[in-house]
Each structure stands twice: as C-alpha cells, then as structure tokens.
Image (cartoon, helix red, strand yellow):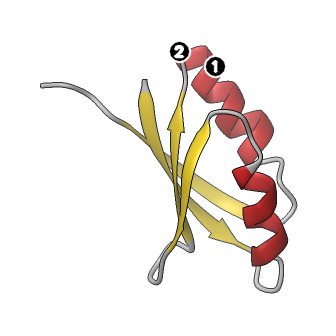
C-alpha cells in the first residue's frame, strides 16, 4: 500500500529532521513544500499495521516532526 504523509516541522530543525526521515525504510520520497505543511512524504508498506508502525514509531519519533497527517491511497 502507498501513502502520503503531510508533516509539520519544528523551525530550525528542518534539515536534520528531513535527513532522518529520508533514512527511514519505507519512505520513498520527501518533498519540501510551502503552505500549511512543511513536507510531503511518500511511503510504501505491505500492510496497514506496518504503515502504522512507520508513521507512529518512526516518522513521528523524529526530532523536529511536530505533526503528521496520513493519506492512504486507494484504487477505485
């Protein structure tokens, strides 16, 4: 399954946070953006449980990540 994660980053910690996020297995792309969110991540996982672990344990655990919103893709 593929998901997009919207991330808010702590000012002054963006560079280190993005480096740490890019090293997380399952994160396939990181895009810095302007607007309500600071970064958009693309992620892949085999199951919803693995995706939850990636988001909750790994991405949210990065120093400098203050908030996330996960958008899980679907086929219609």
Relative depth, front residue between 27 and 7: 27
Quadrant location of the N terminus?
top left
Quarter of the image where one finds residue 45: top right
- Residue at 48%, 77% (x, y): give it: 33
The spot of residue 44 in percent (x, y) is: 52, 31
Distance between mark 1 and mark 2 Cα atoms: 7 Å
Quarter of the image where one finds residue 75: top left
Please identify, in this view, whether the residue under mark 1 or under mark 2 is nearer the observer.
2
User: Looking at the image, how many numbered discs can be counted on the residues?
Assistant: 2
In the image, taking residue 54 as reference, residue 47 lies left or right, namely left
- Taking the image as drawn, is residue 65 in sight? no
- Residue at 75%, 41% (x, y): give it: 24
In the image, taking residue 24 as reference, residue 8 lies left or right, namely left
Q: Residues within 10 Å of mark 1 (few under 14, many from 20)?
A: some
The spot of residue 56 in percent (x, y) is: 72, 37
Relative depth, front residue between 69 and 2: 2
Q: Residues within 10 Å of mark 2 (few under 14, many from 20)?
A: few
- Residue at 62%, 68% (x, y): give it: 8
The spot of residue 6 in percent (x, y) is: 51, 58
Q: Which mark is residue 50?
A: 1
Location of mark 2 (residue): 46
């Amino acid at each position: 399954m593929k998901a997009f994660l919207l991330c808010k980053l702590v000012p002054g910690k963006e560079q280190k946070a993005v480096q740490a996020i890019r090293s997380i297995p399952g994160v396939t792309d990181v895009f810095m953006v302007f607007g309500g969110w600071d970064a958009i991540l693309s992620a892949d996982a085999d199951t919803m449980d693995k995706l939850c672990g990636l988001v909750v344990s790994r991405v949210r655990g990065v120093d400098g990540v203050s908030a996330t919103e996960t958008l899980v893709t679907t086929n219609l």
